[in-house]
């Protein structure tokens, strides 16, 4: 394996035998004619990919898609039926809550047990144990048996142990979803630190935003098959578009993915050659500034059209000046009566990270709409810094007794923001004034 490769997976398949009845196992084992009483189920089928050292790869897919099976094979918990797996480096994994912990032992005793299993000496553990205790923030419960722990407490302890082993490869399998918001943010900050220090990370999540913000690549698995592998923004966008479909048509998705990749690379190439406009220029419409990564959801009783940003006097623009007011609008045509309707929008940066958004009539509020056409109008102050951004438009409603998208357009409109205030850094401006005052003697 190449010295720059941390994980190499080729034609990986994991197959299970499924029996209708328990006695069928015995019948099959004893049958002199080798009659089969089972049917084969592929938890993974012909999955292949490489992960370079220092790369952060997100794995996304519905429950039962093979994500956990893949990670268990990579960590040696399961063996594959076919194919090969090569891993170079020390692995630390959080696969299941409480995995590797003895429920009869205290949290502190489990720290020593788990870290010794991962190859650390007693002296090394003694030097690290306080870091684990401080990160987990379990207080007096650290001296209680882990069988008394809640799922969130197990997640805290498991993650604290995993990151303090100083792994070459960190594998996290959705364990953080049970933690509270503050602890989740703490964990993500630590993973960002581990990433910046050059470790390889495999991160399984259902969260589109988490994968986009943390990962440099994303892999979409569905029914044990690898659908697409590439830029997180595009992979998660197509996954969300098809998340509720029973049948995933791999060939069609691959074609759409390749087209989006080609358009996105063209857009980035054009962006690199663009000269930064002077901040004194007024807002205007640039016909060449069009999104090339647009994804259209299926129309299910509604259709979004005529998406645009205008000035307050109605002039269509896509090159905006920071600090000024604009209106984002789109038309919604309802072709059949819908119940529990909500219309919304999102603003994202070039990497797909969500920066802000809103819904009408409000969070947890809905309206019923008969066949009609209406316009959604969002007035906003452009407090984005210099750069390129995208708007999403979406309409949700009750379909088959559940709330789901009846139409959505990802990257429906693209804008470029001209920096107006050189003191502002970051993506979003929330500063009213920066001043310097000399101390009086």
Image (cartoon, grey):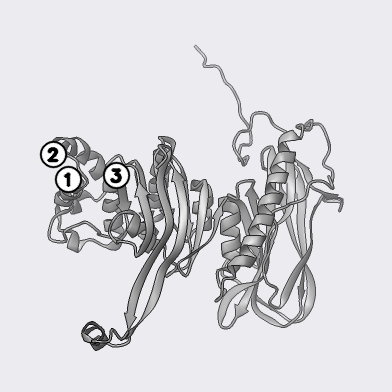
Real-space Cα separation, disc 3 to disc 1, in angstroms: 19 Å
Please tell me the numbered disc located at residue 135. 3
- State whether residue 358 is above or below residue 159: below
Please tell me the numbered disc located at residue 55. none
Instruction: Sort mark 3 into few (<14), some (14-19) or many (20+) by Cα contacts within 10 Å.
Output: many
Q: Residue at x 55, y 69 (%)?
A: 243
Sequence-earlier tag: 3 or 2: 2
On the picture, is 133 further left or further right than 315? left
Q: Are marks 1 and 2 in contact (CB under 8 Å)?
A: yes
Real-space Cα separation, disc 3 to disc 2, in angstroms: 20 Å
351, 345: nearer the viewer: 351
Q: How many marks?
A: 3
Please tell me the numbered disc located at residue 122. 2
- State whether residue 103 is above or below residue 211: below
From this viewpoint, is residue 419 visible?
Answer: no
Q: Estimate the x, y position of residue 230 in percent, counting from the top left.
A: 56, 51
Determine which residue is flagged by label 1. Answer: 116
Q: Secondary structure at mark 3?
A: helix
Residue 336 falls in image quadrant: bottom right
């Amino acid at each position: 394996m190449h010295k720059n490769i941390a994980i190499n997976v080729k034609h990986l398949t994991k197959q299970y035998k499924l029996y209708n009845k328990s006695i069928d196992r015995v019948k099959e084992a004893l049958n002199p004619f080798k009659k089969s009483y089972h049917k084969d189920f592929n938890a993974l089928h012909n999955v292949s990919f490489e992960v370079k050292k220092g790369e952060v790869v997100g794995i996304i897919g519905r429950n039962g898609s093979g994500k956990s099976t893949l990670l268990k094979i990579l960590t040696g918990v399961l063996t594959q039926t076919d194919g090969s797996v090569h891993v170079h480096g020390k692995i630390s994994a959080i696969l299941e809550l409480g995995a590797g912990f003895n429920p009869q032992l205290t949290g502190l005793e489990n720290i020593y047990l788990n870290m010794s299993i991962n190859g650390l000496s007693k002296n090394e553990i003694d030097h690290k144990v306080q870091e684990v205790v401080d990160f987990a923030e379990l207080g007096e419960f650290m001296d209680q048996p882990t069988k008394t722990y809640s799922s969130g407490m197990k997640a805290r302890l498991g993650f604290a142990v995993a990151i303090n082993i100083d792994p070459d490869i960190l594998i996290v399998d959705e364990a953080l979803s049970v933690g509270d918001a503050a602890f989740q943010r703490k964990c993500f900050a630590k993973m960002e630190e581990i990433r910046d220090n050059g470790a390889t990370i495999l991160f399984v999540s259902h969260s589109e935003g988490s994968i986009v913000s943390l990962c440099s690549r994303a892999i979409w698995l569905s029914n044990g098959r690898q659908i697409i592998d590439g830029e997180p923004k595009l992979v998660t966008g197509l996954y969300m578009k098809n998340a509720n479909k029973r049948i995933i048509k791999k060939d069609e998705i691959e074609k759409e993915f390749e087209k989006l990749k080609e358009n996105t690379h063209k857009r980035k190439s054009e962006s690199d050659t663009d000269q930064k406009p002077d901040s004194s220029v007024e807002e205007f419409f640039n016909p060449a500034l069009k999104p090339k990564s647009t994804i259209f959801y299926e129309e299910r009783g509604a259709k979004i059209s005529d998406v645009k940003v205008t000035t307050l006097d109605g002039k269509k623009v896509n090159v905006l000046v920071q600090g000024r007011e604009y209106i984002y609008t789109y038309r919604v045509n309802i072709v059949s009566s819908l119940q529990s309707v909500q219309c919304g929008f999102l603003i994202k940066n070039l990497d797909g990270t969500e920066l802000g958004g809103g819904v009408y009539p409000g969070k947890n509020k809905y309206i019923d709409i008969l066949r009609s056409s209406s316009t959604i109008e969002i007035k906003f102050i452009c407090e984005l810094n210099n750069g390129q951004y995208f708007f999403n438009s979406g309409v949700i409603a009750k379909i088959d007794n559940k709330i789901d998208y009846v139409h959505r357009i990802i990257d429906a409109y693209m804008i470029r923001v001209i920096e107006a205030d050189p003191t502002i850094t970051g993506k979003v401006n929330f500063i009213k004034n920066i001043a310097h005052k000399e101390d009086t003697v």
